[in-house]
Image: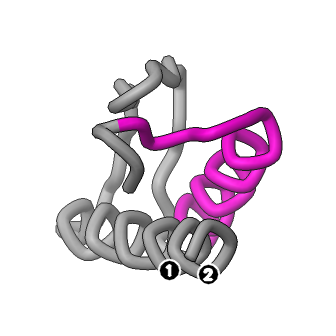
Amino acid sequence: MNGGTSYTDDRDRTSFLEILGRMCERYGIEMYDYVLMDNHYHLILRTLRSNLSKGMQWLSVTYTRYYNMRHR
């Protein structure tokens, strides 16, 4: 990603949030709050299954793929 920036514009932010929502649905994770910074994010999540690391890995890989395709 460009110079440590995770989101180039509002389209990137919106896409990240859409992917985050899909991650929550896919892995049964409840999201209580989030903050998007320029180069990172904070999440307050709850999961009843032992799958948080798998969900976070899926989120990172999926968003990175999106970002790289868009900003190649």
Q: 37 or 52, which lies in front?
A: 37
Q: What residue range appears in magenta?
A: 5-25
Confirm or deny contact between disc 1 and disc 2 (CB under 8 A): yes
Location of residue 55 in the rendering, given as x and y in whole percent from the top left corner: 35, 69
Q: Is residue 63 magenta?
A: no
User: Dot 2 surroundings within 10 Å: few (below 14), some, or many (20 or more)?
Assistant: few
- Which residue sits at x=44%, y=70%? 64
Q: Nearer the viewer, mark 1 or mark 2?
A: 2
Q: 27 or 41, which lies in front?
A: 41
Q: 41 or 30, which lies in front?
A: 41
Tell me which corner region of the image, top left, top right, bottom left or bottom right, holds residue 56.
bottom left
User: Dot 1 surroundings within 10 Å: few (below 14), some, or many (20 or more)?
Assistant: few
Quadrant in which the C terminus is drawn = bottom right
Quadrant in which the N terminus is drawn = bottom left
Task: Identify which amino acid the numbered label 2 is placed on.
Answer: Met
SS at circle 2? helix
- Which residue sits at x=34%, y=31%? 40
Q: Is residue 16 above or below residue 63?
A: above
Q: Is residue 44 left or right of residue 25?
A: left
Location of residue 7 in the rendering, given as x and y in whole percent from the top left corner: 56, 40
Location of residue 51 in the rendering, given as x and y in whole percent from the top left corner: 24, 70
Q: Is residue 49 above or below residue 33?
A: below
Tell me which corner region of the image, top left, top right, bottom left or bottom right, holds residue 8.
top right
Q: 45 or 8, which lies in front?
A: 8
SS at circle 1? helix
**Which label belongs to residue 69?**
2
Q: Which residue is mark 1?
A: 65
- Which residue sits at x=40%, y=49%? 2
Task: Identify which amino acid the numbered label 1 is placed on.
Answer: Arg
Colouring rule applied to residues? one colour
